[in-house]
Amino acid sequence: MANETTIDVRTMAPRDRHPQIFSTFDAMGVGDAILLINDHDPKPLFYQFQAERPGEVSWAPQEQGPERWVIRIERVGAPAGGGVIMMEQTPLVLDVRDDLRNGREPFGRIMETVASLQDEQAMLLIAIMEPVPLYEVMAGRGFAHETTRTPDGDWQIRFFRQ
């Protein structure tokens, strides 16, 4: 039977919140969940989970403000390496939302970022639309991708070498 742990971070020091949440998450088995209670929208935590634990987490808002946010964070996948905690490089994050909103084509910036990646490093692209044509371009360069639509309607695409 899956376990659910409630973490109310409203009374915690801000510097202690993310470490406590990730420590609890990392100790959980697949199917276990955290019921997070916060006094603001924990969107930065969502982005951190997507970047650092891709494919491992389900993020399900239960209550969304204005004074209290409740998010169910479930472990849906095993850690990379079949349970062995592996140190992986931090993905290079490229946020092209402002480019797209202002009518600028971000393709050049994206390709420059790809060219700067280290051998096993991933890229996390944040956009206001799903960049479907980019998938084929990146596949031609040996990259696979994982795509997530965020609760606010943005897109996060993690590109990684196959």
Image (cartoon, rainbow, N blue to C red):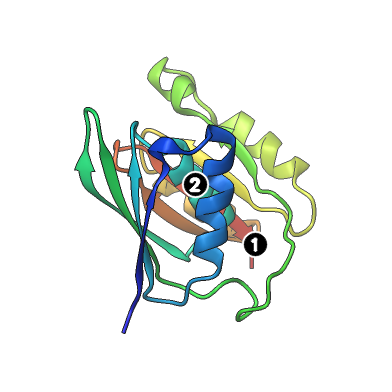
Quarter of the image for residue 39 reads: top left
Quarter of the image for the N terminus: give it.
bottom left
Q: Amino acid at mark 1?
A: Gly
Residue 137 visible (yes or no): no
Image position, residue 140 (x, y; %) = 60, 58
What residue would you read off at disc 2?
134
Image position, residue 125 (x, y; %) = 53, 41
**Residue 137 higher or lower than 32, as above or below:** above
Q: Are marks 2 and 1 in contact (CB under 8 Å)?
A: no
- Number of numbered callouts drawn: 2
Query: Which residue occupies the foreground of this view, 101 or 88?
Result: 88
Residue for point 70% across, 35% down: 112
Query: Which residue occupies the foreground of this view, 131 or 51?
Result: 51
The residue sitting at the top extreme is 102
Quarter of the image for residue 76 reads: bottom left
Residue for point 57% across, 59% down: 23
Q: Amino acid at mark 2?
A: Leu
What residue would you read off at disc 1?
142
Relative placement, left or right, of 66 versus 51 is left
Image position, residue 58 (x, y; %) = 36, 60
Residue for point 57% across, 71% down: 79
